[in-house]
Amino acid sequence: MKNKFNLFLIIVIFIFIFVIFYKSLQDTNIYTPSVKINNEIPSFSAKLLYSDETVNSQEIFESNKYYLLNIWSSWCVPCREEHALLMDLTKEKNIIVFGLNYKDTKINAQEFLNELGNPYEKIMFDKDGVKSIEWGAFGVPESFLIYNNKVVEKYIGPLNKELIKKIKLLIK
Amino acid sequence: MIYSIIGYYSLISGLCLGLILIYFSVKNFKNSKLLDSKILSFTFLQFFFVVISFLCLILSFVLSDFSNETVFNNSHTTKPLFYKIAGTWGNHEGSLLLWLFVLTLFILIFLVRSKNQPIKYKILTLVFQQIIIIGFFAFIILTSNPFNYIYPTPIEGLGLNPILQDPALVIHPPILYLGYVGSSIIFSSALAATTLKMINKSWAAHIKKWVLISWVFLTIGILLGSIWAYYELGWGGFWFWDPVENVSLMPWLALTTLLHCILVLEKRLILTSWVIILSITTFTLSMCGTFLVRSGILNSVHTFANDPERGLFILVFLFSLIFLSLIIFFFFHKTNKNNSESLFWLSKETSIIINNWFMMYFLSVVLIGTVYPIFLDVISSQKISVGPPFYHKLIIPFLIPFLLMMAIGPSLKWIKSNLENKVYLFSLLIISILLSFLIVENFDKNILINTILISSALYLFFITLRDFFIKKNKNISQNIAHFGFSLLILSILFNNLFSTEIITNLKVGETFVSNDTKIVFENINQKQEKNYKAILGNFSVENPDGTTDKMLPELRIYNQPNIVTSEADIKTTLLSDKFIVINLVQNQEYFNVRYQVKPFMLWIWLSVLLVSFGGLVSFFKRNKHEK
């Protein structure tokens, strides 16, 4: 009798552990922050890549203008792919493209831009990745469309031609 | 291309053979006079197919065949040949092939080596092992096929993570796996023996060498990982209580306890439940570690891919194995009441049982520290991280009685004993306490706890040292292992107490002067290697004793993938390590310089080697007796 009870108890414990592990599997963003759409942009200050000047995030985004904040890194292969599209997008008059350089080194970032061109009006430097987390980023590349100090759209992963078309439609 | 096809179909054949083997085993089990010769040949054939498939993957890596997805994701043409080959098991898919390799290798050796064992027992062990093997075959083929084909063929691969490109890390996975996966044979055999009610002295003598060999490999595997972390990660430590380190430590703790229980079981028919539960626990913890690491629940360098589907497969498989073994344990195992009661308080077995409970306590601390953050996150969405202070606070106090027990236990006799040589034991204790007080006295941190800790470790050290001369090879393997362990604890303690560290930012040409050390940053050189560029800092360090060391820490900028790693420069001497590492400081021409003097670092590695050498001695001693 005691034996059966022990077995039952142990099985219950293991089922509990199973459920917990199962749940944590489902919860893919277990170590990543929540998606923030239609939220006010986070406030932070960051150094600029080229000038060492510190800027405040809420100062550089003017209202009534569209901004695309692109989180990128020189070591990130998909960033390389989407870069040409950003070069194309930055020619549009209605949008300003900002960069947030993620966990990168200054030298590598500059080499990357020298090679592929610089679509960014301003590049903020995020050595330890903390600022990107404040933005609610999962990884690189990731882009945020910002209007009136609010995140309108969030694009996880590299931008593609269709997304660029959509962005161009939105800003017109 | 052709290798991928051969490799893939070898895997399928291996899986089919697993199913055929189970069929034959069940048939053979019913009328078991003789072991079917087909069983042995099929087991060999299965192993052969796994080897073929493994070789195919290695060849694909060597030839940089980027039409293979695994090769594309983890290799690059500029990578040295050595790391191309090592890249085979430096990724999720390849390392699972390694799992299969060890699983099939061990069951083959098991069948060949255990000629004198009952046939039913051999067949049943094979069946349980085949269940595990089939599970892994299915896992590989369904969720992580190493031979996935990509079209169009990419010209260049993505490269192996540079921090994995290191000699210690090339042999770390195979060695660790021999221990980790080797515990599967203990698991299968324990289940078979439980079902047939043959958990007894002769079974213990038979399974002991499997426990020993897995234990030796696991110990060395963990050691290699730790050495790698020491000089590659550049954090200047050897153990960080990182979840991934913990999942390798947990099976080790369980296996060590199992080893001691087996030793008792070999002499007296007690602790049978302990042995069965620990055999199950060891393998379950190995599987659990695989699950935690591979599902991406824990983040670390070992997390290859974040794929929930894979995690789910291992999770379901793991729990099926747990339930299977629980049912077998509860329905087939009956404890022998006559024997279990007769424990005298002062005997070898009592001291082993006491230390088993301590080991179980350490195991639970590590287990809770590792999985508690996951539980908390699911239940209350709170994110916490458990760091070294948690483990230190909970483990260190209990280390003291543990060490004392380890010192006294082996000198006791089986069944019933008196404390012999009381004068010796007592005087050594006094000497240890006095000596450690003299050592600690000069340092004004926590005199009491440190004195007690060091004296208990010193006590074990003296006792085991004395036993070398007195016992005349009576149990030399145990003596070596325990002596090694005391040396390990002493080295860790001294290392923690007497380490010094200087952290500063320096420009080229600048000098840092502390009260006894002078660090001069002379210049930097550049070096171009095949797959990385290196910046070498040229430092000269003037020691307190007037000598000067030239030290050349490195920053490596790998081209594919583009990652910067710091290579520490370490000057190792018998008594201490000098460790220097540089990092770039952003936006400035300053380098962040960390210089550490770490005493007895070498002894940490040596003592772990000594501990595993003790295991090896025991392994070979056993073999002699058999013949």
Image: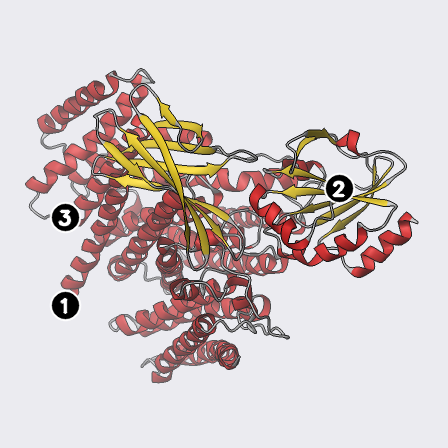
Q: Nearer the viewer, mark 3 or mark 1?
A: 3
Please determine whether, in this image, residue B35 is positioned above or below residue B209: below
Element assignment for label 2: loop
Q: Say which residue label 1 marks.
A: B627
Q: Say which residue label 3 marks.
A: B476
Chain label for disc 2? A
Q: Position of residue B442 (x, y in %)?
A: 25, 16
Q: Position of residue B345 (x, y in %)?
A: 24, 34
**Nearer to us in this view, B36 or B343:** B36
Please determine whether, in this image, residue B15 is positioned above or below residue B555: below
Q: How is the image coloured?
A: secondary structure
Q: Say which residue label 2 marks.
A: A121
Give the CA distance from mark 3 to mark 2.
73 Å
Give the CA distance from mark 3 to mark 1.
20 Å
Please determine whether, in this image, residue B451 is positioned above or below residue B227: above
Element assignment for label 3: helix
Q: Is residue A170 left or right of residue B144?
A: right
Are the residues under marks 1 and 2 on the same chain?
no
Query: Mark 3–mark 1 contact, CB under 8 Å?
Result: no
Give the CA distance from mark 1 to mark 2.
80 Å
Residue B475, disc: none
**Nearer to us in this view, B25 or B510:** B510
Q: Is residue B542 left or right of residue A112?
A: left
Three-letter amino acid code at disc 2? Answer: Glu
Query: Is residue B139 visible to us here?
Result: no
Crowd rating for badge 2 (residues with CA inside 10 Å; few <14, some 14–19, many 20+): few
